[in-house]
């Protein structure tokens, strides 16, 4: 009963119910609709919509990433990680994917498991301080303090005066 109510509400949020579009523009639009619901805190509705879209296109990396990101934002880290890993395996390669997968590992398994994801995030976008901060956090969690300080300092180069980084040094 609750699932059908969520589906009903999720359907009502869309102007016109529509299936996943085969065009890449349509898929991007579909993923954006999922992200929009999640950003409003409507995580259940976002997952229902995403699952409906994935039923039509199960290997669409942007939808797989949208599902993993929604679970991450909802704080369901152990559920999010397999979806984020799958998105990467399907070819997604963006900063937020790697950063979320890294934090998911930090919070649900280990700093060591997080490090490769954090490194990849900094490779994808070297100008974003949060990637360097996340990498530093995973290195500190492994007891690699000199490496962590260097990563925090890199984050400060990108975002001078950042209080989050300064507080960690």
Image: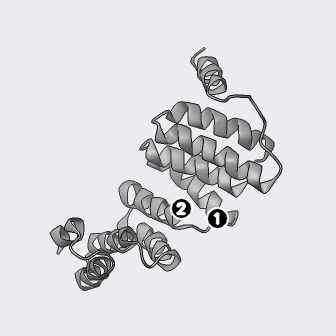
Which residue appears at 73% of the width and 40% of the height? 53
Left or right of 111 in this view: 125: right
Where is residue 18, by image quadrant? top right
* Percent coordinates x, y for residue 84 in the rendering: 57, 57
Q: Do the residues labelled 1 and 2 touch (CB within 8 Å)?
A: yes
Would you name the residue on which mark 2 appears?
97
Quadrant of the frame with the N terminus: top right
**Figure quadrant of the C terminus:** bottom left
Residue 76 in view in this figure: no
Q: Where is residue 93 in the image (x, y as percent from the top left)?
A: 61, 68
- When the figure is inspected, residue 150 is found, relative to residue 96, above or below; the finding is below
Q: What is the CA distance from the residue labelled 1 to the residue labelled 2?
A: 8 Å
Q: How crowded is mark 2: few (under 14 residues within 10 Å), some or many (20 or more)?
A: many
Q: Position of residue 58 (x, y in %)?
A: 75, 48
Residue at the extreme front of the image, as rendered = 15
Q: Residue at x 66, y 30 (%)?
A: 14
Q: Is residue 121 left or right of residue 152?
A: right
Q: Is mark 1 on a helix, strand or loop?
A: loop
Instruction: Give SS at disc 2.
Output: helix
Report x, y in % for residue 118: 44, 71
Q: Nearer the viewer, residue 59 or 154?
A: 154
Q: Residue furthest right?
A: 22
């Amino acid at each position: 009963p609750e699932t059908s109510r969520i589906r009903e509400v999720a359907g009502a949020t869309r102007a016109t119910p529509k299936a996943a579009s085969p065009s890449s523009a349509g898929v991007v639009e579909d993923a954006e609709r999922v992200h929009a619901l999640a950003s409003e805190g409507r995580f259940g509705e976002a997952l229902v919509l995403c699952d409906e879209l994935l039923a039509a296109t199960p290997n669409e990396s942007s939808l797989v990433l949208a599902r993993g990101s929604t679970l991450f934002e909802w704080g369901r880290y152990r559920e999010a990680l397999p979806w984020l890993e799958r998105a990467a395996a399907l070819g997604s390669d963006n900063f937020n994917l790697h950063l979320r997968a890294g934090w998911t590992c930090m919070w649900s398994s280990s700093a060591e498991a997080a490090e490769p994801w954090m490194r990849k995030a900094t490779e994808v976008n070297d100008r974003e301080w949060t990637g360097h901060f996340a990498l530093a956090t995973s290195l500190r969690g492994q007891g690699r303090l000199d490496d962590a300080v260097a990563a925090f300092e890199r984050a400060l180069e990108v975002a001078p005066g950042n209080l989050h980084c300064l507080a960690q040094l």
